Amino acid sequence: MNDRNAGSALFLGVFLFAGLIGLGYIISNGVMKMKSLERTVSVKGLSEREVPADVAIWPIKFNAVNNDLNELFSDIQNKNHLVLGFLKESGFEDGEISVSVPAIVDRQAQGYSDASKLPFRYSGSSTITVYSRNVEAVRKTMNKAVDLGKKGIAIVGQDYETRTEFLFTKLNDIKPAMIEEATRNARDVAQKFAKDSDSKLGKIKAASQGQFTISDRDSNTPYTKKVRVVSTVEYYLSD
C-alpha cells in the first residue's frame, strides 16, 4: 500500500514538473514575442501644397480734417460716395461692400497740449471694406486705387488695421488627399529605416494626423497660400 502511494506521488511529481517546464516555455515564448512587438520606429510624413486664396478682405481707409464738425461729416460722406462709385465701376456688388461708422476726434476735448497750434480742431476717418471671393478683381482694383488720389482721397497705407487679407477657406476639399500623401511619405521613410536596420516593417502601432497650417507663400504674394501638414506614424518592426 505504501509502495503504491509512493509510486502515485512520484508520478504526480513528474507530471507537475513537466507541466511547469511546459508552462515556463509558453511564458518565455510569449515574453519573447511581446519583446519583439516592442520594437518600433516613429517617423514623420510631410505634405505641402500651394493654393490660391479664395477670399479677399480689402479695407479702404481715408482721413479728413476740418474746424467745422458739420463740414467734416459732409466731407467724409462725399468721399465715401466717391469710393463707393469707384468700387461699383470696378464690378463689386452691394453685398461685397460695407461702410463703417466714421471715427471723429475732437483734439481740444482730448486734451492735446498743443491743440491751439493745430490748424484743424477735428479729425475723422472712414473705412470702406470689400469682402469678395473674386480675389483677382480685388487685386486689379487695388492697383487702380491711385485714381482715388486724383479725386482728392488719400488712402491710408497698408498698416496693421488696413492691411488687405487674403484667405483660403477650402481646406476640407484638400484635407483627405494631403493626409493620404503625408501618411504615404511617412511609410516610405519607415520602409527605408527598416531596410537599413535589416528589419521588416509591421503594422501601425499609433498615428497622429498633425495640425494643418496655412501661411503666405512669401511676403510679396499673400494671395498665394502654402498649406502644410505633418503626420506622425509609429510602426512595429520585426526580424
Image (tube, rainbow, N blue to C red):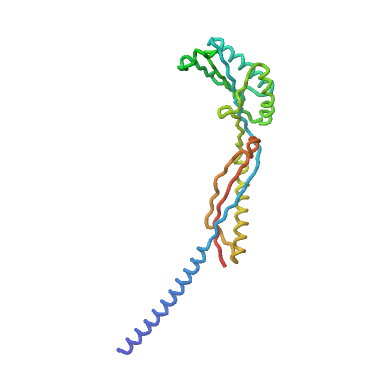
Quarter holding residue 66: top right
Q: Front-most of 143 and 212? A: 143
Q: Residue at x 59, y 13 (%)?
A: 75
Quarter holding residue 82: top right
**Count of number-bearing discs:** 0
On the rendered image, what quadrant is the C terminus found in? bottom right
Measuring from the top left, give residue 29's x and y in whole percent.
48, 71
Measuring from the top left, give residue 185's x and y in whole percent.
62, 53
Q: Residue at x 55, y 52 (%)?
A: 232
Measuring from the top left, give residue 57's x and y in whole percent.
60, 29
Measuring from the top left, give residue 94's x and y in whole percent.
62, 22
Q: Front-most of 63 and 130? A: 63
Q: Residue at x 62, y 16 (%)?
A: 81
Q: Is residue 238 above or below residue 108?
A: below
Q: Is residue 123 above or below residue 230?
A: above
Q: Front-most of 227 and 207? A: 227
On the rendered image, what quadrant is the N terminus found in? bottom left
Quarter holding residue 87: top right
Q: Front-most of 79 and 135? A: 79
